[in-house]
Image (spheres, rainbow, N blue to C red):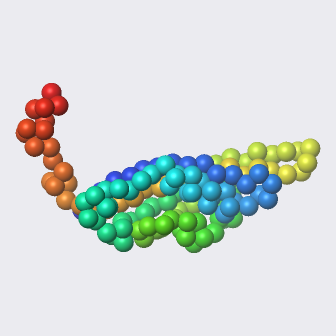
Amino acid sequence: MMKRIILETGTGNDLYGEDYTKAACRAVEDAIRHSSLILFRSLGFDHADMQVQVTIGVQHPEKVDAELVAQKLPRGTASVRVVKGGLNVVDADNNSCTVVATAAVEAWLDIDPNDWVLSDASAASRA
């Protein structure tokens, strides 16, 4: 049964180029910098078994190359969904816009939840 094991969020921007894909990639990079998936090494899981679901929020979702964003994920099988969100900060004086993207990166693994139940001894020591 697929269980979500990680949820990380990140923010990225493109200050001058108004490049939505660049901002999205930076948001994903920000999110994954906050994670260390040591359970794979510690418990013998294979990174290839991990499913990674990325949701990107930007003001113009159609301007994001989702395949390029997926390539920023170093492990697992990635899928990217782009939705309306994020923020455009308009600089009317210079006729430009800063693009701010947000990312939610979820990692899923096929694990048996019964393998992760606290034993009675562990539960008693926590009380």
Q: Is residue 34 above or below residue 122?
A: below
Q: Quadrant of residue 92?
A: top right
Quadrant that contains the C terminus: top left
Q: Position of residue 109 (x, y in %)?
A: 31, 62
Q: Is residue 120 left or right of residue 37?
A: left
Q: Is residue 4 visible?
A: no
- In the image, residue 45 sits, relative to residue 31, either above or below, namely below
Residue in the foreground of this view, choosing between 59 and 93:
93
State the residue at coordinates (49%, 59%): 54
Residue drawn at the location 8% of the way across and 38% of the way down: 121
Which quadrant of the rendered structure holds the N terminus? bottom left
Residue projecting furthest to the right: 93
Image spot of residue 39 (x, y percent): 31, 56
- Give residue 67's position: percent from left, percent from top: 57, 72
Image location of residue 87, percent across then percent down: 68, 47
The answer to which of 123 and 80 lies nearer the viewer is 123
In this picture, residue 120 sits left or right of residue 112: left
